[in-house]
Image: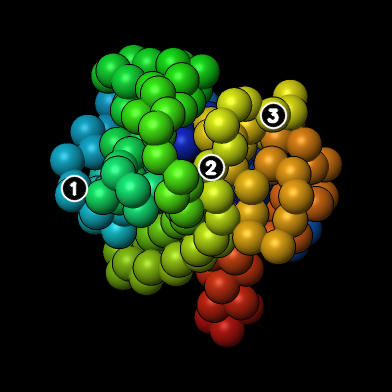
Amino acid sequence: MKLIFATSNQNKIIEVQSLLPKSIKLLSLLDINYTNEIEETGITLEENAQIKSDAIYSSTLLNCFAEDSGLFVHQLNGEPGVHSARYAAINSTSQENTSKLLIQLKNTTNREAYFKTVFSLCINGASTLFSGIIEGTITKESQGNGGFGYDSVFIPRGYTSTFAHMTRAQKQAISHRSLALHKMIHYLGLL
């Protein structure tokens, strides 16, 4: 089965491809030469994931899935949340976003947060949503060189190191993206 993953983010493609069964051939937006910007106008991760999968399906008529993820910090009333990728500015880097987050939390002891991912799978025009959540805390400074996004400041509950300190396999065993993806893979096996 061929599936288009509605992303150009190479880190996400690598992470997802390594978890998919060999029977699923993953194509990225780059593979299908899709260069149109998909505006994420939703106010939830669910809405944004579905906007992306619907856009790709309506453009290509090929089965696809899209994903939206966010970091939700309790002390900041859920920020950066749905705006995680553009928290510091519209085209901000992960380092800029992480720096802004650490500044926002500078004078607080409540550093509880969670990562959430939502996948929207569009098969023959019908969408199904799958989500995964992992709870944890935000560090006071970046730690580790692996991962991407906010991985260097997020310690999953029950662990002592950030996602950025973990190997790819360690992170994939527990991450929000993996949890959601496993639900989607199980569903695909039922089709």
Q: Position of residue 21 (x, y in %)?
A: 74, 62
Circle 2/circle 3 CB separation < 8 Å: no
Considering the image in quadrants, where does the N terminus appear? bottom right
* Element assignment for label 3: loop
Instruction: Answer above or below: position of 63 versus 26.
Output: below
Instruction: Answer above or below: position of 142 versus 25.
Output: above
Which callout, 2 or 1, points at the residue further toward the start of the chain? Answer: 1
The amino acid type, in three-letter code, at marker 3 is Gln
User: What distance separates the C-alpha of mark 1 from that of mark 3?
Assistant: 32 Å
Instruction: Sort mark 2 into few (<14), some (14-19) or many (20+) by Cα contacts within 10 Å.
Output: many
Instruction: Answer above or below: position of 126 versus 30.
Output: below
Colour theme: rainbow
Q: Is residue 34 left or right of residue 4?
A: left
In depth, the one of 173 and 76 nearer the eye is 76
Instruction: Sort mark 1 into few (<14), some (14-19) or many (20+) by Cα contacts within 10 Å.
Output: few
Instruction: Answer above or below: position of 149 versus 63.
Output: above
Please give the name of the residue rendered at 79% of the width and 42% of the height, measured from the top-left corner.
166
Please give the name of the residue rendered at 53% of the width and 42% of the height, measured from the top-left corner.
138
Which residue occupies the extreme bottom position in the image? 190
The disc at residue 42 is 1
| Residue 59 visible to an observer of this rendering | no
In depth, the one of 10 and 132 nearer the eye is 132
Q: Which residue is mark 2?
A: 138
Circle 1/circle 3 CB separation < 8 Å: no
Quadrant of residue 159 within the rendered picture: bottom right
The amino acid type, in three-letter code, at marker 1 is Gly
Quadrant of residue 174 within the rendered picture: bottom right
Q: Which residue is mark 3?
A: 143
User: What distance separates the C-alpha of mark 2 from that of mark 1?
Assistant: 26 Å
Which callout, 2 or 3, points at the residue further toward the start of the chain? Answer: 2
Considering the image in quadrants, where does the C terminus appear? bottom right
Q: Position of residue 60 (x, y in %)?
A: 35, 44
